[in-house]
Every structure is written in C-alpha cells, then in structure tokens.
Image: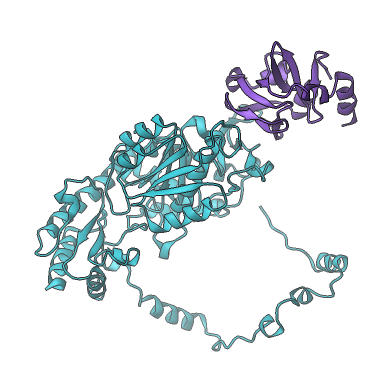
Chain colours: A purple, B cyan
Amino acid sequence: MKIDPNCRYRSSHEYARKDGAEIVVGISDHAQESLGDIVFVELAEVGKTVAQGDAIGVVESVKAASDIYAPVSGTVVAANGELAGDPALLNKDPYGRGWLVRIAPSKAAEWEGLLDPAAYEKEAAKE
Amino acid sequence: MPYIAATDNERKAMLERIGAASVEELFSVIPASARFPKLKLPLPLSEMEAMREIESLAAKNLCASTSAWFLGAGAYYHFIPAVVDALSSRGEFLTAYTPYQPEVSQGTLQAIFEYQSMASALLGVEVVNASHYDGATALAEAVLMAYNASGAATGLASGGRDKAIVCADLDPEYKDVMRSYASAFPIRLEFLDLPPEAAAIRSDDSTFCVVVPYPSFSGTLGDIAAAATSAHAAGAFLVVHTDPIMCGLLKSPGEMGADIVAAEGQALGNPMSFGGPFLGMLGSSAKLVRKMPGRLVGEAKDAQGRRGFVLTLTAREQHIRREKAVSNICSNQGLAMLRACIYLAAMGRSGMRKVAELCWSKAHYAAGLIAALPGFAVPALGSKQEFFKEFVVLTPIPAAEIADKLSRRGVVPGFPLSRYYPERTHELLVCVTEMCTKGQIELLARSLEEAAE
C-alpha cells in the first residue's frame, strides 16, 4: 500500500492534496487496489458546488461501482478528462495522472479534520 | 438449466426454523372464508369436449386474419413468415431466463447479440439493448436514462435539470406509463400539444430531454432533425419513439440526431395477441451506453480465441448500487426479442423496405379513397402532412358508431379516438398495413360511405 505523505485522507479512501489554492482529489492506492481494474469513471461537472461528503464521482471497476465523496467543501474547478479514454490511469498512478477532480475549497478548516497519512495507514490496514 | 423445487424434507426444515407447523399456517392472516374457497366449477371435460368448447368460444372473436382489419393504435397486424414460428419454438430457445452462465447459454446470447446488431442498424443508433417489456416501458426507461445521463440523478451536474418536454400526440397509455415511472423521481413532465420541431424549441436549461413520437399517435411525422437541433442547442437529449417497420423505408431517428430511440417492436414477427407480450426496443448513441438500463450482450473471445458471447457492462448500477440506480430493470423480453430477431434476419434490408413501402402505398391509397367520400375528410392529406401507415379520418357521424356497425360485418375500420379523448367523437384512426388487400381497402371505403348514409 502506497501512501502519499503530502496528502490528507478520508476513511472512505479519497485523498486530498494541496496544490496552490486548490485541492487535488483522488482515491488512494489502497482503494484502487481493492477495487481492481477500473473500467469507467464519471466525474462531477466543472462549476458544481459541493459540500464535504457530497458525491463527486463514481468509479466502476470489474468488481464494483463506488461513489467518490468530496473530502472538502468548495467548487469543482477541474475534472480529469484523461480518465474517460483511459480509466486504467487510476490503477497505474492514483496519486498522479489518475487524479479525479480539483476543488477550490471554501472552508479552510476542513483540511485539519482529514486523516493524516499515518492515521489513514492505520485505518486502511484494519480492512 | 434445471430447476429443482424444495423437497419435503427441506420444506419441513424451513417450517421448523421459522416455527410454523404447516405451509397452510403461513396463510393464516388471510380471512378464513377467503383462504381455501370451494370453487363452483362445472364437471371436468374430456380433451375432445374441452377442445370443442374452447373452439366455439374462440370462434366468437373477431380475428384480424378473417376480417378487413384497419385497426392499429399501438398493436399492428403485419405478416409473420412461417420461419419465425418454426425457429422460435425450437427447444434450444425455450428458456428466456437470464443467460448469466455464458458456457451454457451461447444460443440465447448469440440471438440477443444478433437482435441488438440488426435493431441498431434499423433504428440508426450505435447500441441497442437486449429489450424491454414493451414500447411504453422502453420509452419510460428512455426518459429515466436521459435524466440519469444529464447528471441530475447522480447529483454530479452543476445545474439540476428536471424537466422532460413531451409531445402530447403520443399514445395515451404510453403517457400513463411515463407518469408512473416519473412519479418516483423528481421529474417534471411537460406535455405540449405541438409537433416535435415546435415542442423542442421550448427546451431550456431545466430540460433534460424532449420526447417525440415518430410517427405520432395520430400518425403524423414531424421534423426530427429540427427537433434534435433545438434540443441539443439547449443541452437536452432528444428521445424518440418510433415504428421499426417504418424505419425500413424512412430515415431512422438515430440518423436524424436522436440520442435515445425507443420503439414498440411487436410488429417485427410478433402477433397482436390481445395486446401482449410485446417488445420494448431501446437504443442510444455509444456515449450513453453506461446509462443504458437492462442488459447488453457483447461479442468476446474465449480462452482459445474462439468467438463467443457474454453479458457485458454488467458491473452496473442496476445490480450493485440499487439505491442509486435510476432503473432496476435487469431483464429482457426473451421470446418476443427472439421472434423479432428471426423476423429481421428473414426479411433482410430489402424485405424491410418492401414491407414499409407496401404499408406507405396502401395507407396513402386508402386515405385518398376515404378523403373523396362525401362527409369524410383526411386532414393529413389536406395539409400535406407526412404520414406512414396510420391517419386520422374525420367522420360525419360518431366514429364509435361506425366502428360498431362495420365490425359486425367483418370490417374493422379503425380506432375511434373518443375512447381516449371523449370530445373527439368524430375521429377515426385508420391503420393500413401490407396485410390489407386492395379489395379490402375498397370495401372499407364503400362500407364507410354506407355507414354514414
């Protein structure tokens, strides 16, 4: 299980990484591994306002289809268009080219409430 | 696939587990008087006696094959080549049960695959699923599919589109089914009494789809390409319900820009059978395939590289995220679909065109004869409105009276619109297919004239 030390996490396996004023959101390496081969990704429309915990996408693998939830509140400012043609990027590079959306956060304090890498590693190891 | 019922021992174990003494005890909530009623049935009959009774009852029916039949309005009398009955009743096809195990279901799976492929070509769309119950449910599913694809259902879109614009000149029973389906979702149905191209112009940023019949219930053909342009300009999908026989001759809805096409497929090799079972056809552009309800069969290769068929795209919401699914339809109409598949294969491209040409020509011949009768009018002819095999006739006396009078003489002249629209007393919907002979069409015209005298 790879953990990106620069990210914060949700126990539902989304990560959030600060990039300037925006937050890059994706699913953890652990999540992609448990889902298996990802075949389809549907993401929120750019411009959509989300609250923390709202659905921002659906990831479908050969085994399951899972909702992806926003780790922070804000506005979706970008969605990874590359995934439509190559959903396997999520398996290959979950923290890099397999990112899902970028959110312009509206509640800075939410970041501190997310799991730090060590806490997430413990959570994920329980499964 | 064998099905083995529970054995006596298994039943006993189950009863013991739930603490019931007998199966009868499970029905104790039903009032005793209604529980095991004594039925006052006549004495049993021998096979010979039963046949005689049933045949004498059947002889009271007015049959399409023994009358001059001009009734359509949703169920259509078309020729069914003998090969359809012969092949579809083969034992290999007898189960319509879910072919989840491809290793024992190649016949069924291939039949579905062939049906999907031929239906795609006919409707002008990239993908058609394994079928739905009937045209009405296919159309209602098409609306839900458009809703789902707009992102409104999943909450992923920024603006919540919740309105479907529906052309009001659609089979009233289809509208009822659509209302039932939509009632479980925050969907608004806006019925507009306008032709397709005019209704589609009303699309706005709250519209997720425009629903257009092609042909309409009263038989007219609107401008689908214009409707598509207007719907798309507003960011809405165009959903079209069509007649698959007509698609053998005229440009298909898919070719004219429809995103989702639904159709009643009964006309393809299935008898009218008192109204069912029918065949719901549903297809769409490839980009919407992930939102398609029902099942889909794909071509694949087995471990030895041989061509085979499997259910595809199955890790889908209908099965595994039921609470999020916009449709829970996972089934299909196996036998009716198989018959349509055989019919399409037997007819071929040129056969489909020929049938459609016969329908068009005979309907237009009939319309011309009727329009010339004193007191009768065919508005579609007068306004140069395009139609295919059905058209409305304005009658000098109530249409229901004419239908009643003529039916007794073996001429079923059409569908009196007063049955659905009480105020439309003097309108008869006439349908002419390839089955109507020139003699029958002339008999219809004469009979109408006499009835009105």
In the image, B55: left or right of A43? Answer: left
Q: Which residue is drawn at 69% across and 58% down?
A: B3
- Please report the residue visible at 48 percent of the width from the left and 49 percent of the height from the top: B140
| B419 sits to left or right of B17 | left
Image quadrant in which the C terminus of chain B is located:
bottom left
Q: Classify residue B258 by image quadrant.
A: top left
Q: In which quarter of the image is residue A16?
A: top right
Q: Position of residue A115 (x, y in %)?
A: 84, 24
- Say which of B193 and B146 sits in front: B193
Q: Where is residue B441 in the image (x, y as percent from the top left)?
A: 18, 60
Describe residue B138's horizontal placement relative to residue B56 as left or right: right
* Residue B249 position (above or below residue B422): above
Residue B125 showing in the rendered view: yes
Q: Nearer the viewer, residue A45 or B238?
A: A45
Task: Answer left or right for A40 relative to B441.
Answer: right
Residue in front for this viewpoint, B361 or B342: B361
Please tell me how many numbered marks the rendered image carries.
Answer: 0
Relative to B453, does residue B159 appear above or below in the rendering?
A: above
Q: Say if residue B88 shows up in the picture.
A: no
Q: Write the residue at 11% across / 65% down.
A: B375
Residue B33 locus on image (x, y percent) = 68, 85
- A64 w.r.t. B141: above or below: above
The residue located at (36%, 54%) in the rendering is B80
Position in image of residue B302 (x %, y %): 63, 30
